[in-house]
Image: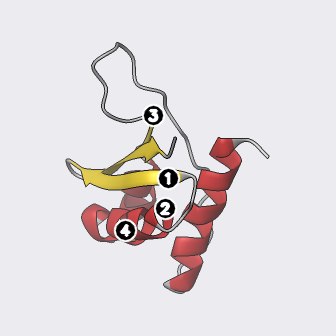
Amino acid sequence: MAITDVLTEAFRRALARQGLPEPKSVVWQVPRGGQATFNYATPSAMAFAKEHGMSATTVATYIADELDALPEVATAEVAGPGFINVMLAR
């Protein structure tokens, strides 16, 4: 299973734990340039929150907490208005 599949499953699981519907899609982006302090980022929490009239930061926090629990993830942080940045474990 690809790491983005693992991350997406955790994203979906986090929403389900809150009694929220499944997202239409989850997009993972790889940062450009050598200065990034994370391996993947997603704006999908913001899109989900907007679609459901929720706080993007709240939704992103649910998801980041779930991602943080994965052995594949070193850290998952909410950034800005609801982005989630993920640093993979070595």
Q: Secondary structure at mark 2?
A: helix
Residue 55: quadrant of the picture: bottom left
Residue 77 relative to residue 74: left or right: left
Nearest to N terminus: mark 3 or mark 2: 3
Residue 67, numbered label: 2
Q: Amino acid at mark 2?
A: Leu
Q: Residue furthest right?
A: 1
Residue 10: quadrant of the picture: bottom right
- Image position, residue 67 (x, y; %): 49, 61
**Crowding at mark 1 (Cα within 10 Å: few <14, some 14-19, many 20+):** some
Question: Distance between the Cα atoms at labels 3 and 1?
Answer: 10 Å
Residue contact between numbered discs 1 and 2, judged by CB atoms under 8 Å: yes
Nearest to N terminus: mark 3 or mark 4: 3
Q: Is residue 82 above or below residue 31?
A: below
Q: Residue furthest front?
A: 90
The residue carrying mark 3 is 39
Question: Distance between the Cα atoms at labels 4 and 1?
Answer: 19 Å
The residue carrying mark 4 is 59
Nearest to N terminus: mark 4 or mark 1: 4
Q: Is residue 79 above or below residue 54?
A: above
**Crowding at mark 3 (Cα within 10 Å: few <14, some 14-19, many 20+):** some
Image depth: mark 3 or mark 4 in front = 3
Q: Nearer the viewer, residue 47 or 1?
A: 1
Image depth: mark 2 or mark 4 in front = 2
